[in-house]
Image (spheres, rainbow, N blue to C red):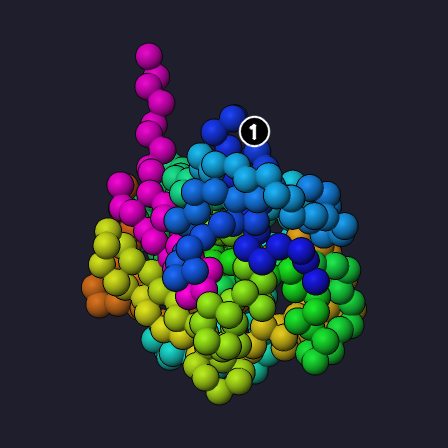
Amino acid sequence: MPAFSRLIRFLAKDGKTYYGDAILPAEVSDLAKTTQARIIKGDIFGTHDVTDEVVNVHELLSPLSPSDVPTVRCLGLNYEQHAREANLPLPTSPILFYKPSTSLTGPTSPIPIPLAAQTPPQIDYECELVAVISRPTLNVPASAAMSHILGFAVGNDVSHREWQLRRGGGQWSLGKGFDGWAPWGPGIVTKEKVAEMTGGRDVDGRDGKGGLRIGTRVNGKRVQGSETGDMIVGVEETVAFLSRGTTLMPGDLIFTGTPQGVGMGRTPPLWLKDGDVVEVELEGVGTCTNKVEFTKEKSKL
């Protein structure tokens, strides 16, 4: 069990980057509101200590450096109502795809849209619960899976539907793997702390209490709102399934799917535009707020 309860990685006002255990008032659970943290020394995935040294936070970064994330796995169609809005049958086993580590970015970083993804304008948002693996995990039963999870974050599986569904040759990753298309954070919260902040509820609702509230706002307007209890395959079952014959490594991320309300599922579709501000939020964890920025064509002069 880690020594921290709410892990953040941040740029301090002294210009240095630290890992820290976030300090928040008792009534506040959104890690995006963190202004101070206790410095963590040691190996986040091994022996470490939360010190008494308190540092002011200047900017929250992605909770782990991209170089410390071996693999980013993602589940598709893992919320029942999302599968129904897509007019697709419920999966009989998890649908898996991958994002490159270069798609990872921080909770306040811009979402860059390269020229290749600007036409046609089919850029979509997907709020997701993200599970972080804490130690080598191979052939682990669902009953033991939670002990292999460092904690939870929220992420945005930014997607270009044309590239995902028509230009990808049947693979989804091309439409979801552009640089900076996986904002996540604002930190990593342990299972125990999530339960403390949400009245004892399980992260995925397998206790029958509905799970955690999860949602998205675009320019301040609510576009997704659900609970993680709508997941078809829960967190523990997902870890057990993915670890069959394949070792999950410390720092591996699992994006666990998105609920209904994506832009593609609306009439007319709601596509993200240059300058839009997207907020994805997860109860007990916090909010990532990212601005869409279209890359400008360089002058030929």
Q: Which residue matches tag 1?
A: 16
Q: Is residue 257 visible?
A: no
Q: Return the residue found at the far top.
A: 301
Image spot of residue 275 (x, y percent): 26, 41
Up the image or down, 108 lies above or below 254; here it is above
Asked if residue 146 lies left or right of residue 125, the reply is right
Q: Residue 87 location, x and y as percent?
A: 37, 78
How crowded is the residue under tag 1: few (<14 C-alpha within 10 Å), some, or many (20+)?
Answer: few
Q: Residue at x 27, y 64 (%)?
A: 223
As rendered, which of 81 and 218 lies closer to the eye? 218
Percent position (x, y) of residue 115?
A: 38, 36
Q: Residue at x 27, y 46 (%)?
A: 276
Where is residue 140, by image quadrant?
bottom right
In the displayed orientation, state which residue is furthest to the bottom: 208
Can residue 225 be seen here? The reply is yes
Viewer-closest of 24 and 150: 24
Residue 224 horizontal/vertical position (percent): 32, 66
Front one among 141 and 98: 141
Q: Is residue 277 magenta?
A: yes
Query: As shown in the figure, which amino acid type bears the numbered disc 1?
Result: Lys
Q: Residue at x 41, y 49 (%)?
A: 32
Up the image or down, 84 lies above or below 72; here it is: below
Q: Position of 143 compared to 129: left or right?
A: right
Farthest residue, direction front = 52
Q: Quadrant of the N terminus?
A: bottom right
Q: Callout 1: helix, strand or loop?
A: loop
Count the labels in the image.
Answer: 1
Q: Which residues are magenta?
A: 275-301
Is residue 253 part of the magenta span, yes or no? no
Q: Is residue 156 left or right of residue 223?
A: right
Q: Residue at x 65, y 44 (%)?
A: 51
